[in-house]
Amino acid sequence: MIRWIYRIFDTLFFGQITIYCLAFCLPLIIGVAHWYEARTGGNAKHKTTWSGGLRTALTFPVAGHPFTHTTFPRNPWKDTVAINPPVEIKLAENTVAPYLLTFTIGSWQDFRTIPAVLIILGYLRFLLYIGSLLWANYLLRNMFRALTYEIYFSHPIWKRCQTVGWIITGYFFAYNIVINLSHVAAWRYLATKGFLEDLQQPFLWPDNWMWLWAGLTLLVFAQAFRFGTQLQQEKDLTI
């Protein structure tokens, strides 16, 4: 059973590396292609945005009820913030924030119009997710590999379990800090476009409590492994 779990984590680890490498390379390829188009003049007046070329998107949570000086959103599900490049605010499907601010990137010029703070926060959220999962998966993989050799109570076992618990717990807090910073930055951008907020919501409540409970559970298991390691060492000394 433990050997099967180890194989699952081993497959997930290398599978994640492959997926994340592709996830990193795709935006880079799109960015280089758009930069080349801009340099060669093939992207004049944002032609790529409307020509059906390569596109990507950045989304940010927005809480409250956004509206302009003259009217509430023309459509209860979606409203246009900017046309060139396309920026929309629409209802979200999750419970963290009722709206999502979406930037559609279809050219190098589109990318340059996005505020730098939003770009940094968007990719920081992505890197946090990737880094936390890869590190935790790597440690769990090594832990179950040691368990396959029937090494149940040792210093590396409980230490790895404890580290994974702190990684997951730390990810929960770091992710929600970044999400709230993104919320503030998104509202500052909307304010420059003439949007107001009739329902003040200064921060977003987390919706990923499962990460916190998983991290705390692993910390409890780590203490159990630590206690078992101490008993094993005392038994060995007695013998």
Image (cartoon, rainbow, N blue to C red):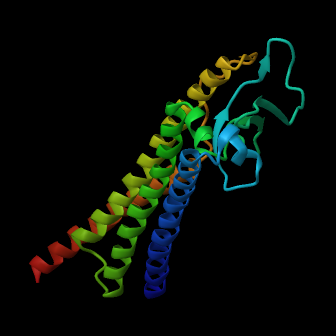
Q: Where does residue 177 sit, x and y in percent of width and height? A: 49, 35
Quarter of the picture containing the C terminus is: bottom left
The residue nearer to you, when weighing 28 against 62, is 28
Q: Nearer the viewer, residue 101 or 146?
A: 101
Q: Is residue 85 visible?
A: yes
Picture residue at 34% right of the left edge, 74% below the top: 143
Disc tally is: 0
Residue 180: image quadrant is top right
Pick out the residue farthest to the right: 75
Nearer to us in this view, 11 or 89: 89
Q: Residue at x 72, y 41 (%)?
A: 95
Q: Position of residue 165 (x, y in %)?
A: 40, 56
Q: Residue 170: x percent and y percent?
A: 41, 47
Looking at the image, residue 66 lies above or below residue 92: above
Q: Residue at x 55, y 36 (%)?
A: 112
Q: Residue at x 10, y 77 (%)?
A: 237
Q: Position of residue 182 (x, y in %)?
A: 56, 33
168 or 179, nearer to the observer: 179
Q: Is residue 155 left or right of residue 60?
A: left
Toward which corner of the image does residue 139 lie, by quadrant?
Answer: bottom left
